[in-house]
């Protein structure tokens, strides 16, 4: 059983206190009722992780580092490693847990490095990370001294991976809620910074997603949006006929100008594209902690400039914008 008590305590003393009226019941239904299949196995894995007291952690390192070998015995480390391996595949990271190095599919630190110099410092801010995966960037946000970080992601595997770490750093003000953003309680104007990274192209209605993000921000609050884009020389919008880079659930890939127009239409202001970078096989690849296919398998065999379907290879933009403080709706 996953314990959400520290989330509820954090909500109690924040402006998100009204969430407590419905959230505990919804979480209970999601994670504690009809537990079966893989999720049951992951919960058993979490329960069998060894008790270890953490003396050191570092959330500002490329590997989120919690504990080291001086905190535990070799036997405990081996037990922990075996448990973490049962939570395969580790898509986001890297992490170092008591000197076990989780080399995830994605080097998520590289995305963080691209955005970190451009965002408003997170010190003391209430932050929402939509589609947070297993929470890698949430830990980095806590490392940047955010007051409270709420990540939201519907994947129960990512929830289990997050709690495998969180149990060894319970005091860090970072929490994962196992829902799609659309299924969160009303978050109108509650967050100082909202991140949406790698989510927009998965949404069938990207404008609705931008409006949801805007609504979660307080007036003047900052959106950090990261998504796939196409080069303007290719098109101003790609709607893949079927799969894109073998993914079934990719709907809209705009160019950066189209993306800026969408944000303007949703009454964001101060819109700036701070980075456009191709995804490299250094950033996304198969590892011993994620043994399935990865980027090299999604690209054309003889031309890494195109996906296996013949579309432009993954190119990702980071855009920062502010919620317009004057208008109330779109
Ligand atoms: C490509 S991953 C990005 C993870 C992380 N944000 C990053 O940038 O590395 C997209 C994540 O969004 C989640 N997701 C998809 N639709 C979502 C929605 N409607 N609300 C919240 N999360 C969603 C998926 O479960 C997945 O973990």
Image (cartoon, rainbow, N blue to C red):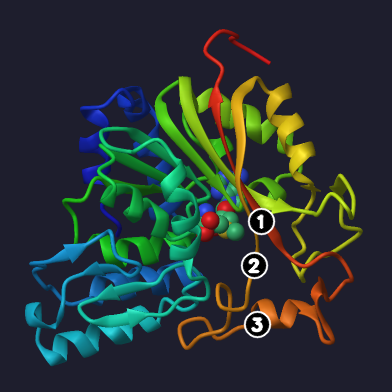
Q: Element type at marker 1?
A: strand
Q: Is residue 34 visible?
A: no
**Residue located at (23% from left, 81% from top):** 99
Which residue carries the number 3 mark? Answer: 293
Tag of residue 279: 2
Question: For the residues marked 2 and 1, what is the alpha-carbon distance in whole angstroms?
Answer: 7 Å
State which tag comes first along the sequence, 1 or 3.
3
Q: Residues within 10 Å of mark 1 (few under 14, many from 20)?
A: many
**Which is nearer the eye, 35 or 167?**
167
Please give left or right for residue 264 compared with residue 219 in the image.
right
Give percent across and percent down for residue 177.
41, 46
Residue of label 1:
316
The alpha-carbon separation of the residues under discs 1 and 3 comes to: 20 Å
Say left or right for 274 vs 305: left
Residue at 80% across, 64% down: 244
- Answer whether labels 2 and 1 touch (C-beta < 8 Å): yes
Position of residue 193 relative to residue 173, above or below, is: above
Work out whether mark 2 precedes mark 1 in sequence or the reverse, and give the earlier one.
Answer: 2
Callouts 1 and 3 close, C-beta under 8 Å? no
Residue 99: which numbered mark, if any?
Answer: none
**Residue at figure coordinates x 31%, y 87% from the top left:** 82
| Residue 28 can be seen, yes or no | yes
**Placement of the N terminus among the 4 image quadrants:** bottom left
Taking the image as shown, residue 292 lies to the left or right of residue 298, namely left
Above/below status of 16 relative to 33: above
């Amino acid at each position: 059983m996953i314990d959400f008590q520290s989330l509820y305590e954090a909500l109690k003393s924040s402006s998100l206190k009204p969430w407590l009226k419905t959230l505990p019941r919804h979480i209970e239904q999601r994670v504690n009722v009809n537990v079966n299949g893989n999720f049951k196995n992951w919960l058993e894995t979490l329960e069998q992780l060894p008790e270890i007291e953490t003396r050191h952690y570092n959330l500002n390192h490329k590997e989120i580092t919690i504990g080291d070998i001086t905190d535990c015995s070799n036997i405990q480390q081996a037990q922990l490693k075996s448990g973490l391996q049962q939570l395969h595949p580790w898509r986001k990271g890297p992490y170092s847990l008591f000197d076990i190095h989780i080399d995830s599919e994605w080097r998520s630190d590289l995305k963080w490095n691209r955005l970190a110099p451009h965002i408003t410092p997170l010190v003391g801010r209430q932050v929402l990370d939509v589609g947070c995966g297993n929470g890698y960037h949430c830990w980095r946000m806590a490392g940047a001294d955010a007051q409270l970080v709420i990540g939201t992601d519907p994947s129960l595997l990512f929830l289990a991976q997050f709690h495998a770490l969180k149990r060894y750093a319970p005091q860090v003000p970072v929490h994962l809620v196992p829902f799609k953003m659309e299924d969160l309680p009303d978050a109108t104007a509650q967050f100082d910074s909202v991140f949406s990274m790698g989510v927009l192209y998965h949404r069938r209605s990207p404008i609705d997603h931008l409006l949801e993000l805007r609504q979660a921000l307080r007036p003047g609050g900052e959106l950090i949006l990261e998504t796939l884009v196409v080069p303007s020389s290719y098109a101003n919008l790609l709607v893949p006929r079927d799969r894109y880079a073998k993914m079934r659930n990719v709907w809209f890939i705009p160019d950066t100008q189209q993306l800026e127009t969408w944000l303007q239409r949703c009454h964001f202001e101060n819109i700036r594209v701070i980075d456009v970078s191709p995804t490299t096989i250094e950033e996304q690849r198969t590892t011993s902690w994620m043994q399935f296919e990865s980027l090299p398998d999604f690209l054309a065999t003889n031309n890494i400039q195109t996906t296996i379907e013949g579309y432009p290879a993954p190119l990702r933009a980071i855009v920062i914008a502010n919620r317009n403080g004057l208008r109330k709706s779109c």
